[in-house]
Amino acid sequence: MVYQLSRTSDPAGTVGSGLGPAWTQTALIAVPAILAFALCLFAPQVLGDGDTYWHIAAGGWMLDHHQVIRADSFSFTFAGRPWDTHEWLAETVMALAYRAAGWTGIVALTGAAAAAVMGLTAARLSRCLTPTGVILALALVGACLAPSLLARPHFLALPFLVLWLGALLDARAQGRAPPLAWLLLMVLWANAHASFLFGLLLIGPFALEALVNEPKAWRATLRGWGLFGVGAILAALITPHGIDGLLFPLRVNGMGALSSIVEWRSPDFQHLPPVEVALLAGLYVLLSRGVKVPPVRLLLLLTLLYMTLGHVRHETLFVLIGAPLVAELMGGAGAPAGRRTRLAIGGAVLAGAVALTMVRLALPFTPGDSTVSPVSALAHAPQGLRTQPVLNSYDLGGYLIFSGVKPFIDGRTDMYGDAFNARYDAIMRPEKAALDAAVRQYGIRWSFLQPSSPLVAVLDSSPDWKRLYADHYAVIHVHR
């Protein structure tokens, strides 16, 4: 049985099963993709996360040594300790992009992921909504994705999520299980980022929906969806880490240290974030149209909402999964674009991306001083000092690794563990006993801190430390 959705009426004419003229559909899919690519090429925000630096360094190490990293070689506090690079594929691709075209390669790679996400989402929405509906929905999706628009593996893996969801939706619309060929996507996803776990979990709701809606065909449903589900789990095991890679996301989600990371905190609804606007808009559309949401999909949407209210980083899941689900509720699942239209879309996006990349290459750039890359400050640290143990701010660890300096800590929270992160938090509060113990144990010779760190004032007033350099992005002290 083909999956059908019901709605009461559409007096405003804002829903539909297609967009009509091919040129309209081409424009509504290609333009958002090209705009997303352009934004990544020229927006400083893309390189605004310190983790970008150590991801490139890790990928470079693996390219040089022709093997996946098994132990830490970047910090001095955890040197030689086990470290599973669960994002090894994305990190290797990032390193290749950097070696091929420097920072232009990194922003272009991120732009390609953004273009794929926006283009694929637009293609899915265009099967259900009118041009006006597609534009409004994409504007909300883009606004919600903007905070996570960073050159990091999590963003590079988002196209996998959109493609995987599309396969599940198409399977339900056609009354069958997804083709087993889609398991190849799961293999890539599992080697690129831990978000593959959400892909595995998405299979359950759609399989349950098939059982509920087609009770007479329960044997065929169990056989088809069961085979696909087991195959997906086996595909997720095809990584250098095997079962440990499959369990890794569960271990990380249980870490107490995550509460100190902004993206693992709850959203701040005091300032009307985009995800709140998207939520309110979705509720308005569904309630004003009198749309009846099938129970299983309602449960899925509520689960995504619950996850979003718990952690900021889940906003991307909420909008990229929620938008197509709501769109289908509004207009049903229309036919995808034809072959000629797809070729036109691909050609337009490729031409736009090449032209924009040529412009970016003609204007080469290197990240300057920022809150995650204090270039000038590190340049003022004597070369001999850089080889000595350093106490650094968490957000500066990635830049230190990229610059060949072994940090005290960096963004690899999973490797350092709860106990070490708790100790670090005590040092940064600061607690004198914790600071003195770390200095003695690790032989710390200098500090590299953000100016906003409370520890800066403590070191300024201590006779054991001497300020060496300070600017708007970092302060350096030397231990006497």
Image (spheres, rainbow, N blue to C red):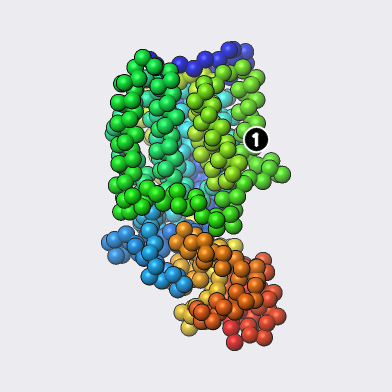
- Foreground residue among 401 and 249: 249
- Foreground residue among 172 and 396: 172
The residue under the point 45% across, 61% down is: 415
- Secondary element at image label 1: helix
The residue under the point 30% across, 31% down is: 227
Residue 362: x %, y % from top left: 46, 55
Residue 337: x %, y % from top left: 40, 24
Few, some or many residues within 10 Å of mark 1 (<14, 14–19, 20+): some
Q: Is residue 266 above or below residue 13?
A: below
The residue under the point 41% across, 51% down is: 248
Residue 278: x %, y % from top left: 61, 34
Which amino acid lies under the numbered mark 1 shown in the image of this protein? Val
Left or right of 477? Residue 418 is left
Residue 185: x %, y % from top left: 34, 39
The answer to whether residue 122 is seen in the rendering is yes
Circle 1 residue: 277
The residue under the point 65% across, 72% down is: 431
Residue 346 in which image quadrant: top left
Image quarter where the N terminus lies is top left
Image quarter where the C terminus lies is bottom right
- Foreground residue among 382 and 239: 239
Counting labels gives: 1
The answer to whether residue 123 is seen in the rendering is no
- Foreground residue among 193 and 92: 193
Left or right of 94? Residue 393 is right
